[in-house]
C-alpha cells in the first residue's frame, strides 16, 4: 500500500471535521464520533483510531496538506538509541516549559522532524532524567510562582462572600456574593458583580460582561465550585475557544493572586462598606465598580511595580470578541426526545418541531432569558425552529429575576362602579335588601309573601 493511499484514506476520515467553519464544540463532537467507530481500511480490515490520532491528522493536514497525511516512520523505544538528539530535544522542551505534557512534546517533535515518537517513550526517558512533571512541580512550589506572559492569556474567576444586603424579595436581607475575574498577567480586576445566588447563570453573566469589556482570554482558571463545574460553562468555553482549567482539589497554589486580591477587597472595600451601610444590591454594585476602576486598577501593584490597567494595556487594547460568537456561546443546550406528536418540552412549555424528527433525540439551543425561541439541531445539523404552542414560562427558572416593586393601590372599586351604572340605568331600582327571602303561609292557601 503506497503512502498516497494512506494519505487519501486519512483525508477521507477527517475531511468533514477539517472544515474551518466548524466551531470547536462541533469539531470535538465529530472527532469523538469518529473515534468511537471502526472504519474500513484499504487493506480490507476494520481499524479504530483514538481521538488524539484524529487531532494529529487534522493538524498535519492543515500544515502540510495531503503530504502531511503520508505514512511516517515510527520511532519506538528500540530505535531511540539511534536518535538521541530527539530525546535531548524532548528534555529541553520539558525543562523550558514544565507544563508541557509528553503528548504535547511528541506533537512538537512530529511537527519539527516528521517522526512519530510515542508519548510513553518520551515520558519514560524524561522520568529517567528527573524531568517528570511531579518532580518539577515540587521545584515550582518551592522556588517560584507561575505568571501568564501576556494580558488575557489567563483569567482567574472566583467568588467572594460579602455582607448581608437588604433585598426586596425577602423579609430582611440576603448574603451578597461577589463573582470576580482577575487577569493573571496584569492583576487587573477584569470585572466583578455582587449577586444574591451563587449559581451557573450568575457566573455566566459576569463572564459575558468581562469578555465584552476586555476581550477573550486564552484560559479560564477556576475551582470546582458548582457555578464553574457544569456543562453550560464547558459549552461556552468550547464555542469561544477558551480552555477551561479547574484547579486540583486541596491544591490552591495556582490561586494565590486571586486570594491576595480577595483579601485586598475585604480590607479596603468591604470594611468601608460596613461603615457606610448599603441599602440595596444596585448601590453595592455601583460603589464597587467605581472603587475597582478608581482604586484597585490604578494602584501600583507590589509585585509587578505597575498599575494593573497600564500593564494590561501595554500592548494596546485587546481585540473585541465577535458578537455573534459570544451570543451563541452563552446560549444553553439540552437534549430532548421528539414525541410521536412531533413535540418537545422545556421548562413546562411545549413546542412543535419538524415531523421528520419523530423518534430522534435532538439538541435544543436557546437563550435562557427568552424561551419563546428554540433552535433545533440533529447530529450538529440545523433543523429549523421549535414553534411554541403556548409559552407559560418565558425565562428559565435558573435565571435570577429582578424583584418587581409592589404596585401602589389605585383606589378603584370596580364592583362599586358596576353597581352605580346599574342603578343609573334602572328607572325604579329594586331595594333587594327589603325583599323578604320567605314568609310563613298563615292561611294555608299555598301563597307566601308578595306572591299572594
Image (tube, helix red, strand yellow):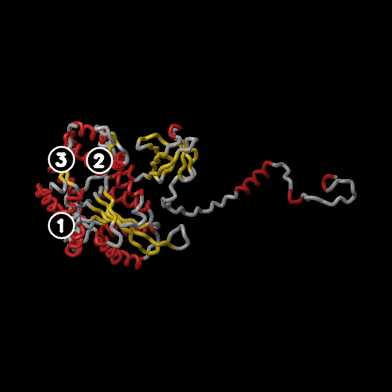
The residue identified by callout 2 is 54
Q: Quadrant of the C terminus?
A: top right
Q: Is residue 32 visible?
A: yes
The mark nearer the N terminus, 1 or 2, is: 2
Q: Is residue 428 found left or right of 148 in the rendered image?
A: right
What number is the disc on residue 71?
Answer: none
Closer to the camera in the image, 12 or 25: 12
Binning the other alpha carbons within 10 Å of mark 2 as few (below 14), some (14 to 19) or many (20 upward) gives: some
Residue at 18%, 50% (x, y): give it: 121
Where residue 46 appears, x then y in whole percent? 29, 36
Residue beneath label 1, please?
128
Looking at the image, tell me whether mark 2 or mark 3 is earlier in sequence order: 2
* Secondary structure beneath label 3: loop
Say if residue 295 shows up in the picture: no
Q: Return the disc, 3 or 1, that comes first in the chain's sequence.
A: 3
* Distance from the alpha carbon under mark 1 to that under mark 2: 30 Å
Residue 105, placed above or below residue 142: above
Q: Would you place residue 219 above or below residue 25 in this image?
A: below
Residue pictured at 17% horizontal, 52% vertical: 314
**In the drawing, does residue 184 fall left or right of residue 90?**
right
From the image, state whether disc 2 or disc 3 is nearer to you. 3
Where is residue 305? Give x, y as percent. 16, 61
Q: Residues within 10 Å of mark 3 (few under 14, many from 20)?
A: few
Q: Nearer the viewer, residue 20 or 155?
A: 20
As measured in the structure, the alpha-carbon distance from the residue carrying label 3 to the one carrying label 1 is: 25 Å
**Numbered circles on residues, count:** 3
Q: Which mark is residue 73?
A: 3
Amino acid at each position: 500500500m503506497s503512502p498516497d493511499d494512506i494519505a487519501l484514506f486519512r483525508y477521507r476520515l477527517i475531511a468533514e471535521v477539517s472544515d474551518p467553519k466548524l466551531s470547536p464544540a462541533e469539531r470535538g463532537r465529530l472527532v469523538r464520533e469518529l473515534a468511537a467507530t471502526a472504519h474500513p481500511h484499504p487493506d480490507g480490515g476494520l481499524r479504530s483510531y483514538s481521538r488524539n490520532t484524529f487531532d494529529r491528522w487534522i493538524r498535519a493536514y492543515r500544515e502540510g496538506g495531503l503530504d502531511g497525511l503520508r505514512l511516517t516512520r515510527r520511532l519506538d523505544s528500540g530505535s531511540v538509541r539511534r536518535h538521541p538528539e530527539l530525546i535531548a530535544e524532548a528534555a529541553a522542551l520539558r525543562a523550558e516549559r514544565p507544563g508541557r505534557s509528553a503528548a504535547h512534546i511528541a506533537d512538537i517533535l512530529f511537527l519539527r522532524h516528521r517522526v512519530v515518537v510515542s508519548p510513553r517513550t518520551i515520558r519514560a526517558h524524561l522520568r529517567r532524567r528527573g524531568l517528570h512533571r511531579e518532580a518539577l512541580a515540587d521545584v515550582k512550589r518551592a522556588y517560584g510562582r507561575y505568571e501568564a506572559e501576556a494580558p488575557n492569556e489567563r483569567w482567574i474567576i472566583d467568588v467572594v462572600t460579602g455582607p448581608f444586603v437588604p433585598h426586596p424579595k425577602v423579609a430582611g436581607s440576603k448574603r451578597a456574593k461577589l463573582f470576580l475575574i482577575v487577569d493573571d498577567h496584569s492583576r487587573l480586576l477584569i470585572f466583578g458583580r455582587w449577586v444574591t445566588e451563587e449559581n451557573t447563570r450568575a457566573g455566566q453573566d459576569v463572564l459575558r460582561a468581562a469578555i465584552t469589556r476586555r476581550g477573550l482570554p486564552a484560559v479560564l482558571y477556576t475551582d470546582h465550585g458548582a457555578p464553574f463545574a457544569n456543562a453550560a460553562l464547558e459549552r461556552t468555553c468550547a464555542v469561544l475557544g477558551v480552555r477551561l482549567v479547574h484547579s486540583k482539589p486541596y491544591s490552591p497554589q495556582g490561586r494565590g493572586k486571586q486570594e491576595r486580591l480577595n483579601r485586598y477587597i475585604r480590607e479596603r472595600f468591604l470594611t468601608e462598606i460596613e461603615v457606610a451601610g448599603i441599602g440595596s444590591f444596585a448601590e453595592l454594585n455601583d460603589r464597587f465598580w467605581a472603587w475597582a476602576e478608581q482604586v484597585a486598577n490604578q494602584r501600583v501593584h507590589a509585585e509587578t511595580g505597575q498599575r494593573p490597567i497600564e500593564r494590561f494595556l501595554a500592548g494596546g487594547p485587546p481585540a473585541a470578541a465577535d458578537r455573534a460568537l459570544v451570543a451563541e456561546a452563552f446560549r444553553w443546550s439540552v437534549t430532548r426526545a421528539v414525541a410521536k406528536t412531533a413535540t418537545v418540552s422545556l421548562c413546562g412549555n411545549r413546542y412543535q418541531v419538524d415531523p421528520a424528527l419523530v423518534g430522534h433525540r435532538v439538541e435544543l439551543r436557546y437563550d435562557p432569558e427568552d424561551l419563546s425561541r428554540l433552535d433545533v439541531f440533529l447530529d450538529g445539523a440545523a433543523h429549523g425552529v421549535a414553534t411554541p404552542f403556548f409559552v407559560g414560562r418565558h425565562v428559565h427558572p435558573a435565571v435570577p429575576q429582578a424583584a418587581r416593586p409592589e404596585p401602589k393601590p389605585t383606589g378603584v372599586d370596580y364592583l362599586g362602579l358596576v353597581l352605580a351604572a346599574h342603578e343609573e340605568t334602572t328607572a325604579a331600582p329594586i331595594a333587594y335588601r327589603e325583599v323578604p327571602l320567605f314568609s310563613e303561609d298563615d292561611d294555608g292557601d299555598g301563597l307566601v309573601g308578595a306572591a299572594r
